Image (cartoon, rainbow, N blue to C red):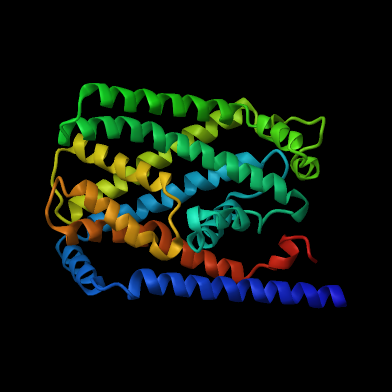
Amino acid sequence: MRKKGKSGIINFLTKVVLVLLFVFIIYKQVFDRENINLLLDELLVAINANPLLPLIVFVLMLFNLGLEALKWRILVSKFERISFINSFRTILIGITTGIVTPAKLGEYFGRVLLIDSKNNWKAIWSTFISSIAQNIATIIFGIFGLVLFLGKFYAIEATIIDITFYLGVILVVGLLFLYYNIDLGLRIIRRLGLKRFADKIMSQDESIKAFAGTGILNNVLIFSFLRYLIFALQYYLLLVFFGVEGDMVTVFAAIAVVYIIQTSIPLPPITNIFARGEIAILVFSHFTGNEIMILSSTFSLWMINLLFPATIGLFIIFRINVAKSLGYD
């Protein structure tokens, strides 16, 4: 009885804290902005002029989430059976818990809530693998985008651009090595004296590749590249939607620069959308001097890809026994 009471308190408090954080973050990022009325007016005018493009971007968001759900299902399939629907729900929950934490660290917590509690640490490790795959895709596109962007808009010596490119290649090679030898991380953790933690993920004699073999890693990486292309296409369509003009290749290069900068900086949730807007202005000011167009594109992308799924995820969390998912029940 006492255990059930403790479980109920944990379940209740977790949900209350999540709701309070979610409402506070959304309020600060949306309703506490000085230019929110201008952004909303710009959005309404643009939708009245061309409602098709935002609809396409919304549909692409669903494909994006579907690809991530497939990634997740593939990664956890070796230690737990999960339906595509539950995998999709897991992604929504992860977005909810990620949106209220710096660098989306809360996503690790959200990803375990629909997994059997005995597999929580495996799920956390799987989330880490998925994150590395997505970062590899972002960095690869970002390197080429950065080189093209710098050469186009800045009078930088070719040597510096070459150095930037080769440093990027070295980083990608290092990440790919880590990605395809992810079990090395567990060995390092064990060497650092965290054997009990490592054994919660995999036993001493079991390789991480028991549930993340080369075939699985290849598929996850392919899905990550496809997700990146959808992200980039969504951003491009919204920029066009709000009137930002430029040749397609250069605009996609600029988008790659924005994404790689965002990935490199662990943004606090309370300044997330503001910082995204400042980064976008810095990059896209080469295409237009109208900051409202740029901010509207960034703000709309954030609402479609993060705010809408996170809100749905919050409702899903209310239907879950969080304490049981964490092994307290």
Q: Tell me which residue sits at (45%, 29%) in the image.
A: 171
One can see residue 308 in this view: no
Residue 66 screen position, x and y as percent: 48, 48
- The image quadrant of residue 48 is bottom left
In the picture, the quarter occupied by the N terminus is: bottom right
- The image quadrant of residue 183 is top right
Which one is nearer the viewer's eye here, 48 or 306?
A: 306
In the picture, the quarter occupied by the C terminus is: bottom right
Residue 212 screen position, x and y as percent: 65, 33
Q: Tell me which residue sits at (39%, 56%) in the image.
A: 305
Residue 297 screen position, x and y as percent: 25, 56
For residue 79, side relative to residue 316 (left or right): right
- The image quadrant of residue 9 is bottom right
Residue 271 screen position, x and y as percent: 39, 63
Which one is nearer the viewer's eye here, 306 or 71?
A: 306
For residue 126, side relative to residue 301 (left or right): right
Q: Is residue 53 above or below residue 1?
A: above
Q: Tell me which residue sits at (57%, 31%) in the image.
A: 179
Q: Is residue 114 above or below residue 10?
A: above
Which one is nearer the viewer's eye here, 67 or 203?
A: 203
